[in-house]
Every structure is written in structure tokens, then in C-alpha cells.
Amino acid sequence: MRLIAVEAAGEGIHSGKSAATSVLGTKGVIHGSRTLLMQTADGQIVEPHSISAGLDYPGIGPLHAHLISSGRAEAISITDEESLEAALFLSRREGIIPALESAHALSALRVMKYEPTDVLVLCLSGRGDKDLATYMKHL
């Protein structure tokens, strides 16, 4: 079994508009937890960016940070554009409008390596109707 952690790369990991904490983060403390977070050299929080409000956060949970750093989970960074494309695909194909957070996970399927016999489980959490204004603005 492989664990995949999907994170928001905004307009690109090194664009200055990203929330890819596993790549850009360093060890620090946020909200009482020692974890990876996006911060300056002197510990000031760096403003993250993601089209998804639920992924627009400067840190990741300590468990996620540990799983990624120990190699037990793989982090895949997805841009805003890639998540929008995946959401549009699912909406057209299945009639399901995913939340933007889930659209990032759906987009990760395009870059993952797997066999035709593998069983993939993807959780569509939340509803996309809350994100319709964002979808309409960008699509």
C-alpha cells in the first residue's frame, strides 16, 4: 500500500505563489505543533497560495510531515491549473462537481505510476458547489 499526500503548488512550486509545504517548508512550530511550515529564515510565516481555501495553509500536520520525511508517504504537488482541469474532467465525465481540495487529489492520478490491476481509492471530500464562483472565474 502506498500513501500519497497531495499538496497545492498554486502557480508552480517556486513561483512565489504556492502552498507546497513538503518542498518549501522547513522545521518549525505553528499552532503548538512542530512540523514543516513555510517560513522565512528568522521564523516568520510565509503567505501560501492555493486556489483551494482548504489547502491555502503554510504548514502540514506533524503526522503528514513525519510520513513524508520517513519515506512512508509520497508528496505530489499539483498546480491550480491542473486541479481545475481534473475538476472539469470529472464534472463532464460523471456529473460530479468536486471540491477544489478533492480536485487536487484527482489530478494526482495523472502523475502517479500504477499498474492496471492496482486498486486506487480516492476520497471526494466536500462539495464543489461551494467552489462554483472560483470555478466560473477561472474556467
Image (spheres, rainbow, N blue to C red):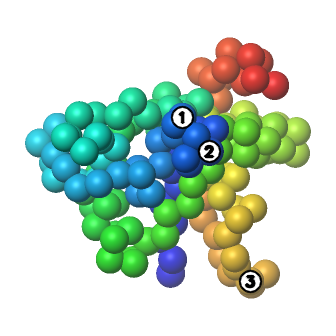
Q: Count of labels shown? A: 3
The CA distance from mark 3 to mark 2 is 28 Å
- Where in the figure is residue 77, as x and y percent of width and height? 57, 54
Residue 12 in the image: above or below residue 1:
above
**Which is nearer the eye, 14 or 108?**
14
Residue 12's tag is 2
Residue 124 in the image: above or below residue 136:
below
Residue marked by disc 3? 115
User: Residue 125: in sight, yes or no?
Assistant: no
Quarter in which the C terminus is drawn: top right
Q: Amino acid at mark 1?
A: Lys
In the shown orientation, is residue 47 left or right of residue 116? left
Residue 17's tag is 1
Residue, far front: 41
Q: Amino acid at mark 3?
A: Glu
Determine the secondary structure under disc 1: loop
Discs 3/2, front:
2
Specify which label sits upstream in the sequence, 3 or 2.
Answer: 2
The CA distance from mark 2 to mark 1 is 7 Å
Residue in view at x 63 percent, y 23 percent: 131
Q: Residues within 10 Å of mark 2 (few under 14, many from 20)?
A: some
Instruction: Tell me whether circle 2 and circle 1 mark residues in contact (CB < 8 Å).
Output: yes
The CA distance from mark 3 to mark 1 is 33 Å
Discs 3/1, front:
1
In the shown orientation, is residue 119 left or right of residue 50? right
Determine the secondary structure under disc 2: loop
Determine the secondary structure under disc 3: loop
